[in-house]
């Protein structure tokens, strides 16, 4: 694991943004894996600013998002589809037909999972996958106990994850109980991974990820130690419980 320690959220966002721009420039048809949550918002803002300054174009970029709630239409303001349009896609020159998110509202989730998994492989895998981490070590929506061999699948969300994500919803009960997520094996197939971790709340998870040698399905992010091209960007607050 390549570990990059930065000062704060802004530095983390800027660093990640530069890495994405570099990937877009290196590849003829870059395939980006994208994440939702508060962590990548600053990175998306930085990408929009770079686009506005003419520093990068997304014309040849394809994207695959990690996950989506079950039961929310893409137009629902709480859906990840809406989030991505709002935070990034509607502000840049990406071809909307090259934007991919699971659809948790088709009525046939199993088929949707198969189709989504197939579309990632058809795109010749993801060049750069951006990840955040849940307090319990989840990546995408792969909760503790998810097999490392998993492909895109439907998950029941942990009570702690629903609690953590309730801030985006009007009422706690509105948080969906299920989601579709890329599997852990799908994520591990990415050619490069960028894991972003910011804030004191994530400090325990960072400590467990970096200082505990055990690779266990009880802490999904631990498998990332086995990826041969991963960079973890950690700000001071998130790294505050590390020994050094
Ligand atoms: C959410 C998402 C993940 C995200 C994580 C952390 O539930 N499904 O993809 O990385 O939890 O979110 P945040 O960045 O808001 O802390």
Image (cartoon, rainbow, N blue to C red):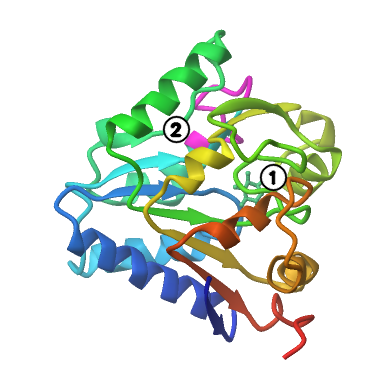
Mark pair 1, 2: CA separation: 19 Å
Q: Nearer the viewer, residue 204 or 79?
A: 204
Occupied quadrant, residue 170? top right
Q: Secondary structure at mark 2?
A: loop
Q: Position of residue 48 (x, y in %)?
A: 34, 61
Quick check: is 80 in the magenta stretch? yes
Instruction: Answer yes or no: disc 1 within 8 Å of ligand 1.
Output: no
Q: Position of residue 126 (x, y in %)?
A: 35, 46
Q: In the picture provided, is 230 more to the left or to the right than 213? A: left
Q: In the picture provided, is 135 more to the left or to the right than 24? A: right
Q: Nearer the viewer, residue 113 or 54?
A: 113
Quick check: is 108 in the magenta stretch? no
Residue pictured at 48% horizontal, 38% vertical: 186
Res 42 label: none
Residue extending furthest toward the left = 28
Give above or below for 83 relative to 51.
above
Q: Is residue 66 visible?
A: no
Q: Is residue 88 visible?
A: yes
Q: Position of residue 197 (x, y in %)?
A: 62, 67
Residue pictured at 34% horizontal, 32% vertical: 121
Residue extending furthest toward the top = 107
Binning the other alpha carbons within 10 Å of mark 2 as few (below 14), some (14 to 19) or many (20 upward) gives many
Q: Position of residue 75 (x, y in %)?
A: 49, 27
Q: Secondary structure at mark 1?
A: helix
Magenta span covers which residues? 70-81
Occupied quadrant, residue 8? bottom right
| Residue linked to disc 2 | 101
Quadrant containing the C terminus in the rendered view: bottom right
| Residue linked to disc 1 | 168
Q: Nearer the viewer, residue 54 or 61?
A: 61
Binning the other alpha carbons within 10 Å of mark 1 as few (below 14), some (14 to 19) or many (20 upward) gives some
């Amino acid at each position: 694991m390549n570990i990059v320690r930065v000062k704060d959220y802004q530095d983390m966002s800027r660093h990640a943004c530069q890495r994405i721009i570099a990937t877009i420039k290196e590849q003829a048809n870059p395939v980006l894996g994208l994440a939702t949550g508060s962590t990548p918002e600053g990175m998306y803002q930085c990408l929009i600013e770079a686009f506005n300054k003419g520093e990068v174009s997304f014309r040849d970029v394809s994207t695959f998002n990690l996950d989506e709630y079950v039961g929310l239409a893409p137009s629902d303001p709480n859906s990840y589809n809406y989030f991505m349009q709002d935070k990034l896609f509607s502000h840049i020159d990406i071809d909307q037909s090259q934007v991919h998110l699971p659809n948790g509202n088709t009525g046939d989730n199993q088929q949707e999972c198969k189709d989504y998994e197939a579309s990632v492989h058809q795109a010749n895998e993801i060049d750069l996958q951006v990840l955040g981490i849940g307090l319990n070590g989840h990546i995408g929506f792969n909760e503790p106990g998810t097999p490392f061999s998993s492909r895109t699948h439907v998950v029941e969300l942990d009570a702690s994850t629903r609690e953590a994500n309730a801030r985006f919803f009007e009422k706690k009960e509105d948080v969906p109980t299920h989601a579709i997520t890329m599997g852990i094996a799908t994520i591990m197939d990415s050619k490069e991974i960028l894991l972003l971790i910011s804030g004191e709340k994530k400090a325990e998870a960072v400590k467990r990820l970096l200082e505990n040698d055990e690779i266990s399905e009880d802490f999904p992010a631990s498998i990332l130690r086995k990826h041969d091209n991963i960079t973890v960007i950690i700000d001071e607050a998130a790294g505050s419980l590390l020994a050094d």
